[in-house]
């Protein structure tokens, strides 16, 4: 879903809950639909943030004259190949 989609769902849900006042919707409550959209957006945001923080990152280090001769991919906190 992504961060943008989650924030969009939260925003649309908040508008439906707090800004739209309807009469005679015959069994459909707009406020309840807004709350459901806000909950779905919040869950999507939490899942997206958890997924983004759990990914492994890779540092790209270029060595040699001009910096473009060779490219080495090193994972962070790698004691064997780390340039640190």
Image: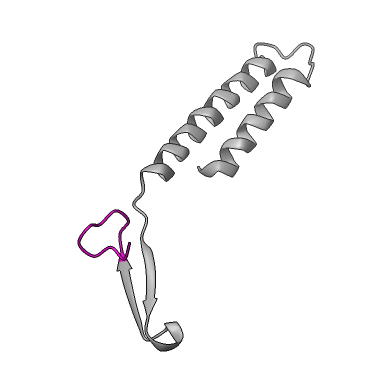
Name the residue located 25 percent from the left edge and 57 percent from the top edge. Answer: 78
Number of numbered discs: 0
Residue in front for this viewpoint, 43 or 21: 43
The x and y percentages for residue 36 are 57, 21
Name the residue located 31 percent from the left edge and 73 percent from the top edge. Answer: 72
Q: Which residues are magenta?
A: 74-84
Name the residue located 68 percent from the left edge and 31 percent from the top edge. Answer: 12
Q: Please identify the quarter of the rendering in which residue 41 is found.
A: top right
The x and y percentages for residue 37 are 59, 26
Q: Main secondary structure of the magenta part?
A: loop
Q: Residue furthest left?
A: 80
The x and y percentages for residue 5 are 58, 41
Q: Is residue 8 above or below residue 37?
A: below
Magenta segment includes 22: no
Residue in front for this viewpoint, 46 or 18: 46
Q: Is residue 74 above or below residue 37?
A: below
Q: Is residue 84 left or right of residue 29?
A: left
Question: How did the renderer colour the structure?
Answer: one colour
Q: Is residue 72 above or below residue 41?
A: below
Q: Is residue 5 left or right of residue 49?
A: right
The x and y percentages for residue 46 are 47, 32
Q: Is residue 3 left or right of residue 51?
A: right
Residue in front for this viewpoint, 64 or 16: 64
Name the residue located 45 percent from the left edge and 87 percent from the top edge. Answer: 66
């Amino acid at each position: 879903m992504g961060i943008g989609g989650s924030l969009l769902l939260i925003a649309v849900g908040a508008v439906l809950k707090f800004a739209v006042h309807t009469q005679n919707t015959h069994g459909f409550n707009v406020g309840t639909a807004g709350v459901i959209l806000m909950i779905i957006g919040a869950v999507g945001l939490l899942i997206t943030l958890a997924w983004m923080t759990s990914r492994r990152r890779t540092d790209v280090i270029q060595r040699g004259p001009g910096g473009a001769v060779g490219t080495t991919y090193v994972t962070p906190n790698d004691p064997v190949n780390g340039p640190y």
